[in-house]
Amino acid sequence: MIINAENLVLGRLATYAAKQALLGNIIQVVNCEKAVITGTRENVFAKYKAKQSPTDTVKAPKVFKMPDMLVRRTIRGMLPWKRDRGREAYKRIFCHIGIPEDLKNKEIINLEDINISKLKNLKYVYIKEVSKYLGKNLE
């Protein structure tokens, strides 16, 4: 199953992908940099900056800067990671920046139910902007 993440809400995309992976489907998420996080720009940036520089560096969660790894880590949060079925499901999830050459001719699913246009909230930030704020320049 190939999912186009363009203009999709990240949390809702993560729950959908996690459920499908738990059912045994191989999930390919393309255009990860175009997914959105709802909330004001300042709040979203502050949340990720606080995760990036915690006080306890030994037990702190790993915060990735690349958009594809940010999306994959968010999907991991929706899985039962400490159980074998959660770890097996996580191995079936692949995230990509843009659309890879081998996936261009295949059918890509656009999930209209979780699109940003369905929300009343107009405050959101693209994953690409969060990644750039954390220190990763994609250009």
Image (cartoon, grey):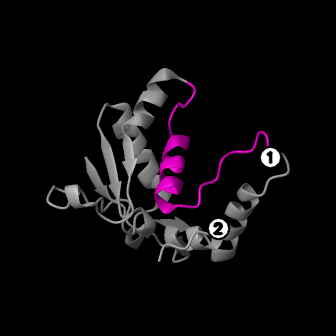
Tag shown at residue 47: none
Assign a secondary structure to mark 2. helix
In the rendered structure, which amino acid carries the disc numbered 2?
A: Leu
Start and end of the magenta stretch?
57-82
Assign a secondary structure to mark 1. loop
Answer yes or no: is residue 32 visible.
yes
Q: How far across and how far down the image is residue 62, in percent?
A: 65, 47
Q: Is residue 99 magenta?
A: no
- Name the residue carrying label 1: 57
- Mark 2 Cα within 10 Å, few/some/many (few <14, many 20+)? some
Q: Residue visible at 34% across and 39% down? A: 20
Q: Residue visible at 64% across and 67% down? A: 134
Q: Is residue 69 magenta?
A: yes
Q: How far across and how far down the image is residue 136, in percent?
A: 58, 69
Nearer-the-camera pick, 97 or 107: 97
Determine the residue located farthest toward the left in the rendered image: 105
Q: Are marks 1 and 2 in contact (CB under 8 Å)?
A: no
Q: Earlier in the sequence, mark 1 or mark 2?
A: 1
In the rendered structure, which amino acid carries the disc numbered 1?
A: Thr
- Name the residue carrying label 2: 134
